[in-house]
Image (cartoon, rainbow, N blue to C red):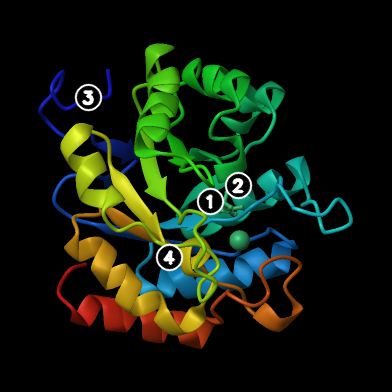
Amino acid sequence: LVSRKKKPEDTLIQLGDVTIGGSKPIMIAGPCSVESYEQVRTVAKALKEAGITVMRGGAFKPRTSPYDFQGLGIEGLKILKEVGAEFGLKTISEIVDPAHIELACDYIDVIQIGARNMQNFELLKAAGEVKTPILLKRGLAATLDEFVHAAEYIVSRGNTQVMLIERGIRTYEKATRNTLDISAVPILKQETHLPVLVDVTHSTGRKDILAPCAKAGLAAGADGIMVEVHPDPATALSDAAQQLNIPQFHEFYEEVKRSGLL
Ligand code: PEP
Ligand code: MN
């Protein structure tokens, strides 16, 4: 169902008056984790002023260590809803439990399925039962064929509103947190009709190369870029090393826009 052979025209994701897919790429930004109302509000205000329309923030955090901050859960979704409404921003947040999929639809505009859950088939099936758009991340070591089949799980249950996001894969290279697979972008665009985005934060894990990687993603045909922004990254409860602060975000966004690709 997700194959371009079945449906030659691009799938467009409509979030109110915001369209993802088609001719105009989008910049999605926000903190790794929702930590507090004030933290999210500070980021949202800056994003709104910069002209951003879609904000991301994690409420259920799939952390490597059980001792790390696990997220605010439903409380975090409530914060996103309130702040999103105040600033007129669409919201994205990760859901990790099939039992939370339906409830999430009341709070957020897009449900993210994270890399670690790309092949959580019960979660994919639950995501297929709702109408809310799904942002599906590529697994840590997933082939493109596995990625596309994971999307097929969702669409085959009836939810056609699926976006794919390349977030880097595991390789032997240690200079970056993961290896950004740029070739995934044109391949996924050719083989599927779904919007394809690039998460520059998790793929690189390095603030100093976000802009060139974002430009590379857009030049390869990506429908959007996702990046993490935190008011004070040094104190962030997750991904402290790789989130941009607000002035850094402005600089990043301006540099990407100067390329004419956004
Ligand atoms: C995230 O986007 O917050 C995240 C946890 O990323 P990933 O699932 O790609 O590791
Ligand atoms: Mn993160």
Quadrant of the frame with the N terminus? top left
Residue carrying label 1: 85
- Three-letter code, disc 1: Ala
- Dot 4 or dot 1: first in sequence order is 1
Label 1 to label 2: alpha-carbon separation: 6 Å
Residue carrying label 3: 3
- Three-letter code, disc 3: Ser
- Name, please, the residue furthest toward the top: 157
Q: Secondary structure at mark 1?
A: helix
- Three-letter code, disc 4: Val
- Dot 3 or dot 4: first in sequence order is 3
- Dot 3 or dot 2: first in sequence order is 3
Crowd rating for badge 2 (residues with CA inside 10 Å; few <14, some 14–19, many 20+): some
Q: Is residue 130 visible?
A: yes
Label 2 to label 4: alpha-carbon separation: 25 Å
Q: Secondary structure at mark 2?
A: helix
* In front: label 1 or label 2: 2
At 44% across and 19% down in the image, what residue appears? 153
- Dot 2 or dot 4: first in sequence order is 2
Please name whichever residue, 123 or 111, is drawn nearer the observer in this view of the structure.
123
